Amino acid sequence: MLDWGWAESLLAIGVAPQSVAEAPLYGDRVVVPALPKGTIDLGLRSWPNMELLRSLQPDLILSQANYGVSQARLQDIAPTMALPLYTAEQQPMRRSHEALVAIGKRIDRSPAAEAFLDQSYARLAAIKREMSAYDDRPLLIIKFTDDRIIDVYGTGSLFNDVLARIGITNAWNGPTNNWGFATAGLDAIARHPEARLLIIEPGPPDAFLKSALWRSLPAVQRGDVTTIPPTWVFGAFPSAIRFADVLRKALGFA
Amino acid sequence: MTPARVYWLAMILALTLCVLGQLRYVAPDRLLEAFLYPDSTSFGQAYVHFSLLPRMAVAVLAGTTLGFTGTIFQQILKNPLAEPSTLGVLSGAQLAITIVSLSLASVSAEQRELAGVVGALAAVALVCGLSFRSGFAPVTLLLSGMIVSFAAGSASVIMALFHHEYLRSVFIWGSGSLIQNDFSNAGALWWRMLVLVPALLIFIRPLAIAGLDDANARSLGISPSKLRLTVLFLATVLSAMVVARIGVIAFIGLAAPHIARMCGARTLPQRLLWGALIGGALLLLADGIVLVITPYLGEVPTGTITALAGALAMLFMLREVPAAPFQGTSDSALRPMAPITRKRALPLLVVLMILVVGLSLTEHVSSSNIDMSVLVNGRWPRVLTSASAGAMLALSGAVLQAVARNPMASPEGLGVSGGAGLGIIAALFLGGMSSPVMPLAGGIIGALIALAIILFVAKRHSFAPGPVMLAGVAVGALVTSVISVIVASGDPRATYVLAWTMGPTFRATGLVAIIAALIAIVALLLSPLFCRWIEILPMGDSLARSIGVNTVRVRATLLLFSATLTAAATLIVGPLSFVGLMAPHIARMSRPRGPGSFMLMSSIIGGLLMMLADWIGRSVDFPYEIPAGILASFIGCPYFIFLAFRQGAKR
């Protein structure tokens, strides 16, 4: 398992991966669904240990297409599925849906995959219904890299697709990279004065939250700032559902 | 043009750009209001007041400091190319700050500053220690600075590879963004300047005298070495504080004093004044440009702009470097030193080679349940590739050290490695990573462009080695800044780029291995043709010419030969390694019979070193792999330092 998105997808349909690249970091970043104890660490995601992989003799290798080791080299070790997720088409949600179906089919777990998808869409639909009570403020999803530079998630990010699903507008309409985010200074936030800020933790230091600059932001003046716990921003379907759930809670829908 | 006129011109241009940038946030009639009494409910006004104003202040203060310390470094080391970045201040501070950021949960500005100052002092102490014996000769000093920067840089890169998500803020800092949130940095810088600048000014008079010559200074009752050390210490502390607060801003300290001098600032006080003022104006100008282009290009760190401009400026300024700076050191280093007699050396090497190849192929402590044939099948490409790359670098180094008449010369310093690295990065981002063809082509094109630039510079200096190495330093600085921008961008491909530039031998396929081996063998077969040249060149140009050797053409040929080998090896093991430096030295210890056997032995040793690095790299942190190239540079840097000290001690 060379990609965390596929690891969580596999867990979602009730199969535990034997080994995952950077397994310890997965616990910090993706958090849930948690990997079972004893999952073997394969080394870097972009650069897994090929000999270890070979010695583990996996039944199937799952990797993200166009990231890390090429499919041809993995195929040499064990049957490999290199599935696209973050691509130039910028539709990670659709890609992760297709991947779940493909993985389910490949490991004879189609019913579980279908069930998980049905359940997830039902959940999204339910959240969408609840969101009709939302005040319709567009959201600006940001992650602080330090107290000066932020990543803003827009078109092509998993979270953008989720927002579209549950009927909330993403305030960020600027250009984004393949992975669906743009890097900008604080002034980018001010260019969307109507937006509510959604900060993915860890946020900036407290001292910064007290600064005159931060307090002059329109959203901050209105008190329109919400934080959500760490959520994997480059994930697959389960991360999308998790994001929808934490967002719902963060917006005050108990 | 007088320095004053240049200063005002740059300043007016910079201020115009800054105001243009500010007018994006407030209406023209409200600008003054935003400066003085911002309306805290208007983000535009608050942004101009609390972010853009301090940003201007920081740009001017930091630029002034860098210009000022740059002038002092150049004066005290009598070296037109000395400045914080070429002396290792930036990389030393960067490494220390990286370590602190990883070991503490949250780092305050003061802790960061302290770490930066300590790291910078250590780096400068090392660089000056290395070049002390040569009397701070320009090229030795810069090469020492380059090596120390490489060492610190490679350590930072390894940490970044394994913690890149935690270290993004460090990399943003490293790329030199001037974005501010309040006046705290501007205030801190101002206070530090208020104390340290007058302290340094006290030394102006003695410095001006010391600038004449040491004997003169001594006759006036000043101890030149104590004076130097004090000033060096204070200037390092001051520039490290700027670096720690603001980030890596390269080349302002180089360009500003140079412009001041070019415009006619002659005496030291004049140069200090105008160097400092022009430094401030230049950085403000760079930042004004960033401010104006941001809406169109996205956030570009100001440090990147200065590094880019600076690398070009450095190539331009090479005209100033004396054409034959390599002297004196050659004799003692090229003389054989160690006890192993040459009769036993070659068989010993062959036995070692067989041993390492065998063990490296079959060792299976951490992957015990693989069939031996499968293990060997998976490993032979990387082992063969490492050996070939090591041999190519070593051969290239052996040739280069003879051409340069300097035992510190190394192919990594040619800049061809850096050029290849840039090409590989560009290819990765343009063409994706699925096939190895694009990066390979990109690497070759990058190497060729770097080679063209370097040959162009070299030609103007009739292929004197000093300027060629310095051109390499400039290209290297460019690569570093591009890499730090990529990591700071947060693109998940960053680890991939980092890994690639560090020489991941694990990617090697059978085909790559065979091609690499073929290139190495062809090069070795060609090398006997160069024996005579290699013997003659170190004896000096006049002697060579007197026996009918066209030194310019010979140098060009040898440079092309070693640059081609460097490019090929870089594609495999990345731009950092130092095998090209180490292997020829070790070979020399065994007193080779002549240039032919010297080149052969260098190659074998280079191959051995690289295979060992590959083996260690894949074993120590299993299942994570440390790239062979960067591991080799870890071994190489201490070796270089040891070498330089021993050389000094022999005098």
Image: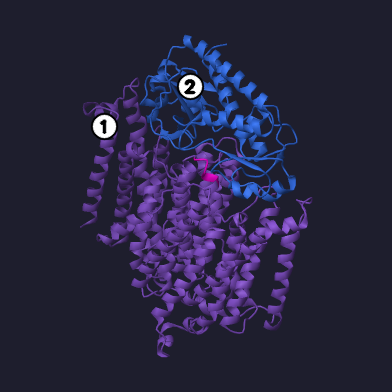
Chain colours: A blue, B purple
Whether callout 1 and callout 2 share a subunit is answered: no
- Horizontally, residue B542 falls left or right of residue B588, namely left
- The three-letter amino acid code for the residue at tag 2 is Leu
Q: Give A216 or A179, whichever is nearer the viewer.
A: A179
Residue A212: image location, x then y, percent? 40, 25
One can see residue B268 in this view = yes
Report the residue marked by disc 1.
B23
Q: Which segment did they paint magenta?
A: B491-495
Which residue is more in the foreground, B365 or A52? A52
Q: Chain of mark 2?
A: A
* x then y, percent, for residue B260: 29, 57
Residue in the image at 59% along x and 58% along y = B629
The answer to whether one can see residue B138 in this image is no
Side of A154 where B44 appears, left or right: left
Dot 2 falls on a residue whose secondary structure is: helix
Main SS category, magenta section: loop
The total of numbered circles placed on residues is: 2
Q: Residue at x 68, y 58 (%)?
A: B379
- Given the current orientation, which residue lies at the most extreme bottom position? B547
For label 2, the residue is A163
Q: Is residue A143 above or below residue B474?
A: above
Nearest to viewer (mark 1 / mark 2): 2
Foreground of the two, B262 or B306: B306
Q: Given the image, on which type of amino acid does mark 1 rest?
A: Leu
Tell me residue B163's x, y (percent): 59, 42
Q: Secondary structure at mark 1?
A: loop
Task: Please identify the quarter of the rendering in which residue B519 is found.
Answer: bottom right
Residue B120's tag is none
Report crowding for label 1: few under 14, some 14 to 19, many 20 or more residues within 10 A (C-alpha). some
